[in-house]
Image (tube, coloured by chain):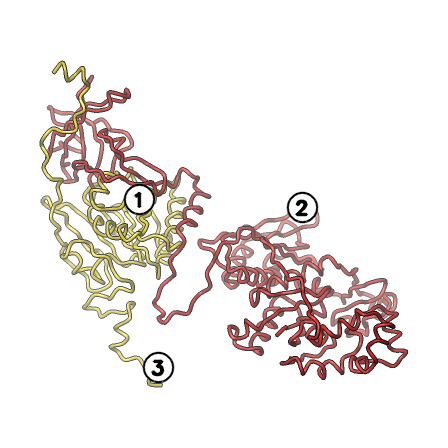
Chain colours: A red, B yellow
Amino acid sequence: MWIAIRLPQLPLEIFLRGSSTPEPFAIEERHRVLACDRKALARGVRAGMAISAALALAPRLRSVPRDPAAETEALLGVAGWVAQFTPTVALEFPEGVLLEVAGSLKLFGGLASLVERLRRGLAEMGWSAAFAGAPTPRAAFWLVLDGREKFVGSLEKIEPALAALSVEVLRRDDETQAALETIGVRTLGELRMLPRNGLARRFGQRLLDDLDRALGRLPDPRNLFVPSARFRAGIELPAEVAQAEALLFAVRRLIVQLSGFLAARSGGVQRFVLGLKHRDRAATEIAIGLVAPSRDAEHFTLLVRERLSRLTLAEPVREIVLQAADILPLAGSNFGLLLEQGKPPGNWEHLVERLRARLGGEAVRGIASQAEHRPERAGVIADLDEKQLELDFGDRPFWLLEAPRPLAEIGAVPHHDGPLELLVGPERIESGWWDGGDIARDYFVARMCNEALVWIYRERRGEGGWYLHGVFA
Amino acid sequence: MAGMSLSFAALLERPGLWRGDSLSRAAAPALGTGFPGLDAELPGGGWPAGTLTEILPAHQGIGELRLLGAALAGLSRRGLRLAWIAPPHLPYAPALAAAGIDIAKLVIVRTASARETLWATEQAIASNACGAVLAWPRAPKYAELRRLQIAAEGGRASVFVFRSPEAAGESSPAPLRIALAASHGGLAVRLLKRRGAPLPRPIILPAMPPAARGKDHHVDRHPAAAAAA
């Protein structure tokens, strides 16, 4: 089952989905009106009209040339969003997206429910859309091109469903259309009545092939849409916006698109950047970071709203761009049997990466024991997941000071916040003569006045003296 | 509708509700502390997971790590990670290994500022990739701890936040707060706050002095010195 989505207002909506203009607005192509907004319609402007005629009807009409590049980008954006419902997505330029949904219907609660979700999501992104469905992609697209929101369930029913469609859905050049009209063929049904070899001679084999593909008699392979690795989407604002909060409406449309894009990739983002482009100044960039990867559009909207509410724009905004580069895997939420099941276990490597990304690689380390008698070498900072030795040391403190701290000695008794009571010891450690880092110390477990236990030693070389080396904790 | 109605008894089965005179049940299975006397007084019968626990030692070195030793050992033996965020000193591998902790599961995060400490703690908690998160934030504010508590809720990590004893007087979003003090060679554990009836008297845990080892050992004498001796 294929669903065809058509965005009939795409050329107009790429300009108007972010904000409206106070004046009537139209898109022009070759000096004619291609599409116009309601304000222009109310004044009698119609598609196909010469711009000069439209201006006579609506003198304040703003017309901008059609922007095919932006339309293509928008269509790709829509494809990236619908890919959350099925991996099989194909494009029908300039305004159609086809999706194969046989495998997705059950998951999304049936055809009607899926179409409703598509319609709602597209509306949230600012697109008006028409839908049709058929077992072949071509039949589905022809139905929607002809303005019929019809869903054909089986191959045999395609032919009667297509019979009434205008031959314009074939999208042939003007000459072919005129020729068909001359011989009195207005619908696909009438076209099918003509003898096949005559048709092929007169209009070429491709026309017949297209018909056969629509009917499912010839295969109709499609180039499938491949989502990009990064997300980037923008909206050009026809009227500059000076209030930061007024941008939220437009940003929200892009956030919905981002959320669908992430769902299609079973991913989330931990950081996205909203760029606000101005006429003269450099763009204002708002980076939004999250504690954990997410694709929750409501959450994103809240964060953006918070930031926009604190923002004072230096200059009005002409265009907004939403970007996200690092797509992190994010499992879909499962519906558990119990609500108290808790969060799913997280990914350890990602945590380490995030911590290292911000704090530096050396900030996140493990520890290890080494076969060494010298205390400062027996327990060290080490690489994460270093293989550990099973070693038996004597009584050792949980904390080791980075460097031994000299202790006061009063009346032959070491002091640390008061006199220290020696409990256990001495443990003599003499080692390291072979590498020059040799030590000779007598270690004691000592009790402080406040009853904390510490690990101290008496230096047996040079000046001697007492040192604090560890805390038992 | 019968299925919708909740009896009072069923309500009391919920982890978030408890009778004023009894202890709440823990949402997540608790970890035994290794001290039956303490387990008996902790809601759920041990250190809770998915929530913040504050530990306020009267002085550093009073026994704050030994208190957690059994729980950390158990978690690490189950293959769970133990994140130590901004510890005051180097956690000493020989001692931790001797306490039964699989030190390969330990990760130390060193930070340059109080803000980084809070950020890293929140990351470690929110990732839900650790069995325990131990953090030493510098003078955390109520709102900052609240952020950590929210991040911890529903997760599997037991989160221990070490604070100075002065913090006992401040209010805190942590559902469990424990003050530690020395008591005649033992460790006095006072439950400042728990989900359930307050406990006026401290629990006294036995002292855990390192075993007596008076004899000389670990002598790798320099051959020359040995000859001279």
Query: In 3D space, how far apart are the residues under numbered discs 2 and 1 (Cα atoms)?
Result: 52 Å
Q: Label 1 belongs to which residue?
A: B104
Residue wearing tag 3: B4
Q: In the rendered image, which quarter is residue A158 located in? A: bottom right
Q: Earlier in the sequence, mark 1 or mark 3?
A: 3
* Image-quadrant location for residue A68: bottom right
Q: Is residue A74 left or right of residue B68?
A: right
Mark-to-mark CA distance, 1 and 3 = 48 Å
Can residue B64 be seen here? The reply is no
Q: Are marks 1 and 3 on the same chain?
A: yes
The N terminus of chain B is located in which quarter? bottom left
In the picture, the disc for residue A281 is 2
Which chain hosts label 3? Answer: B
Look at 21% across and 65% down and name the residue there.
B23
The amino acid at mark 2 is: Arg
- x and y percent of residue B206 in the render? 11, 48
**Does label 3 lie on the same chain as label 2?**
no
Residue at the limit of the structure toward the front, as seen here: A197
Taking the image as shown, residue A311 lies to the left or right of residue A91, namely left
Instruction: Using the image as rendered, state which of residue A11 and residue A163 is in the foreground.
Output: A163
Q: Is residue B24 left or right of residue A448?
A: right
* Amino acid bearing label 1: Ala
**Circle 2 Cα neighbour tier, 10 Å, few/some/many (<14 / 14–19 / ≥20):** few
Between label 1 and label 3, give the one nearer the viewer: 1
Residue in the foreground of this view, choosing between A17 and A375: A375
Place of residue A205 in the rendered image (x, y in percent of width and height, measured from the top left): 81, 70
User: Quadrant location of the C terminus of chain B?
Assistant: top left
Query: Please, what secondary structure does the residue beneath circle 3 have?
Result: loop
Q: Residues within 10 Å of mark 3 (few under 14, many from 20)?
A: few
